[in-house]
Image: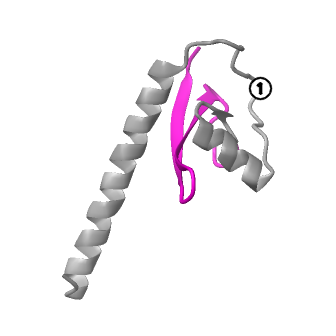
Amino acid sequence: MDGEISCGIHPEFGPAVYFEPAGFADDSSIGTPLNKAAVESLKQAVMTPNVPYSVKKGADLSEAREVGLKVCDERMRQIWLLRRIGDNKKGIT
């Protein structure tokens, strides 16, 4: 199935990985959670996925989770670098 893996960083639960099928990934979509942090994050926010597909029980999601976690790591690295650049421009070390 084609789609996008996305991530969010929850301060309590850590990296949350989601899947959004092709054609359904936009700012208003809530993807299918692929790891425990994503499940817990949605529960805490009282939200449910609004994309038309769900994950079959017993499906092997290890590869999708790993891809998502790598995306999260890269995003966090980019955020850190942007903050450092901003701090350097402000003279903060």
Q: Quadrant of residue 57?
A: top right
Task: Please say if 81 is above or below 54.
Answer: below
Identify the residue at image location x=79%, y=41%: 48
Percent position (x, y) of residue 59? Answer: 62, 12
Identify the residue at image location x=62%, y=41%: 38
Answer whether residue 2 is magenta in the image. Answer: yes
Taking depth in this image into account, of 65 and 85 the one nearest to the observer is 65
Percent position (x, y) of residue 64? Answer: 49, 24
Taking depth in this image into account, of 30 and 15 the one nearest to the observer is 15
Q: Does residue 28 show up?
A: no
What's the amino acid at mark 1? Pro
Q: In which quarter of the image is residue 86?
A: bottom left
Task: Please say if 32 is above or below 88.
Answer: above
Residue 52 appears left or right of 15: right
Local packing at callout 1 (Cα closer than 10 Å; few below 14, some 14-19, many 20+) is few
Question: Which range of residues does the magenta coloring cover?
Answer: 1-29
Percent position (x, y) of residue 69? Answer: 43, 37
Q: Name the residue under label 1.
A: 52
Q: Does residue 83 show up?
A: yes
Taking depth in this image into account, of 26 and 78 the one nearest to the observer is 78
